[in-house]
Image (tube, grey):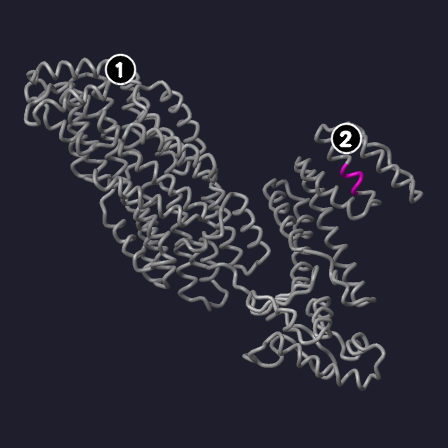
Amino acid sequence: MSDPESVARLAESALHQGRFDEALRQLATIPSEAPLPARLAWQLGRVLHQRGEFEAAEALYGRAAGGAGDTGADRAQLLAGRSAARWARGDRARARSLADEAVRVAESSRDDAALAAACLAQALAAFSEGDRAANEHAYARAFAAAERAGDVGLQLRIRSNVGSRLVEEGRPREAVDALTEAIRLGEGAAQPTLLALALHNRAEAWLGLSDLHAARADAGRALTLWQREGSPLAAFGLLMTARVHLARGSAWQATAAYREAVAMAEPDGNAQVVAQAWAGLARTCYADDPVEAARYAELSRTLPSAAGPVIGELAAGWVALCGGDTDSAARHAADVRSEAGRRRDPAGLAEAMELAALAAHRADAAAAPGRTSARRAAGLVEAAAVWADTGNEVALATNALLRARHAGDRLSEDVAWQRLHRLGVRDDVWHIAGPLAAIGPPPVPEVAVQALGHLAVLLSGTPVPPAGWQSRKARELVKVLAGRMGGPVTRTALAALLWPDTAPEVANRRLSVLISTARGILDPERRHPADRFLVSDHSSVRLDTEHVAVDTARFHDAARAALAADAAADGSRDTGAAVDVVARLEVVVGMYTGDFGDDGEIAGEWSERPRAAFAELHRDVVRTLARRCLRLGRCDAASGWYLRLIGDDAYDESAHLGLIAALSAAGRHGEARRRYRDYAERMQEIEVVAAPFPAE
């Protein structure tokens, strides 16, 4: 066997050539009790640290020979390395004392590379303490020293860490820019683990901007790089993958990734990963096992972590609130508000505001409107402003849904949910401990009547089967009443409509029997008073829309509200308001599932009048949507809506002209000319003078 000094020289040679695995292989042949040259110890220790092997890195730092490493640059590097390893394992106090000592020694040595490493360790310690000013100052010193020393690896590591800090400070757009530059540096770095770190942090920035696809891509690439190197830091990649699944509402996939991250991070004492993974598991496990979720939340809160307590406290707060413990939820929210404010963590602060507002609302759900209720709403509004500043679209849409539920605005709630769907959020998000699980999905109506298209009556979401109707006349009665949107219809008119060839007194007696039959269909178990769903007196009959969800009424009210919002937006310079109007109009269009009475069960004026009114209102909404899209420069969308209008009515002049304008605005001039010729032919058929082709 070669003597330790000779092997150490071989290891140093391999290290300087960038053959890190060979250097570590040589090192493994040296007895563990043999001291190592200080420079070799800290350089190989840094390699192990960047791979996530914190325990092995610490052991290597401890083997540095006393003589050469007692003073100067090498000693500073050793102290900085030990500090970073202690930081990664959640030992804040020791990390701070070692970092401060490293800076003092590095300053005395006047070695820029040592100063950069020492200031980096000091920045990490300040991050754990929530001292943003000290963190930023230390990073600035570290980067300047690394540039002077020409240490590209340290520059990359510092840029990556600064990008992560920008994300936590609610500046994800700046973080993407900074991390993209770090990734450019990392593409040529000797250690792929440094590139993986930059990619991981950019994934976090994309997640903050709600670009779930980009976040998943960067997280996946980082995970692959760490796994190729056999690095325990792959646990970070698994953690980020889990967080993306959590944001999407994919509870099972998130749970699997969190569990794998814990299994990988625990043996090496990576407290930062483990604490966050336990917090994530608390949220994803809540629906299936609330007791286990509470245990995970408590583990996350009590484990010392370099990232601080905010994530664990929030998880504990949401689990408590979803379980009905409003007092505990409020206490966790207060703790997070204090800590997030101190750490300049706007996302944590906004989520704490939402947690506090929902906890207060649940604590007294029956509170009368007043100052307390207004303050709850104000908390949600303030949180929305924070989410808007950070650019987190998923959080902003979630907040909009919370505010809509608080205000009882079902249309705005539907708009917010559609936004979440477009951003990639799935239905399972309602079962993950968080703001949506705390309020629950919209309640399923006990009785719902769908009359746009084919008639259907749903009892707690289940359609009444054909055999359950007992008579065709009962269907006709419900449909007529649905056409009136909860308005009353006289008994005389109903009797004449349903039995036109029968004597009035006989028809009226039949109507009384039919009303009883319809009530039995709407409430087959007779659990409510007779007139809860279908109200009748001596002169009229109506559906009670307080207890029956009637799609005609909901479509009518939502359409009118959306058209009013569009008119109000005309006088505003706020582009965001116009975009919101488009979303509202799109939701209303989706509510129109077919023409009223489309199955032809009722003929004559009773069906034709409401059918024409609803169809015309639908066309007004589509026309308004097309016009608004055109104003916003969404020419392709506008063209699609105008084509839909033309498909329904080939002689709709305004739709033809709108389509031509949209095609021209999109630069599709040849198609616009062809469409103009089609328009002119249609107008000629009905003897209308065609408007001139719009000026280009």
From this view, report whether residue 113 is shown above or below residue 247.
Answer: above
The residue beneath circle 2 is: 671
Quarter placement of the C terminus = top right
Of marks 2 and 1, the one in the foreground: 2
Q: Is residue 243 left or right of residue 619?
A: left
Name the residue located 46 percent from the left edge and 49 percent from the top edge.
382
Residue type (three-letter) at the residue carrying disc 1: Ala
Quarter placement of the N terminus = top left
Q: Main secondary structure of the magenta part?
A: helix
Name the residue located 57 percent from the left edge and 58 percent from the top edge.
409
The residue beneath circle 1 is: 149
Q: Magenta stretch?
A: 655-659
Characterize the local packing of mark 1: few (<14), some (14-19) or many (20 or more) Cα atoms within 10 angstroms.
some
Is residue 197 one of those drawn in magenta?
A: no
Residue type (three-letter) at the residue carrying disc 2: Glu
Closer to the camera in the image, 500 or 417? 500
Residue 406 position in % (x across, y down): 50, 59
Q: Which mark is residue 464?
A: none
Name the residue located 73 percent from the left edge and 29 percent from the top edge.
668
Residue 286 position in % (x across, y down): 36, 56
Name the residue located 65 percent from the left edge and 62 percent from the top edge.
551
Characterize the local packing of mark 2: few (<14), some (14-19) or many (20 or more) Cα atoms within 10 angstroms.
few
For numbered disc 2, what is the local secondary structure? helix
Q: First in sequence, mark 2 or 1: give its number.
A: 1
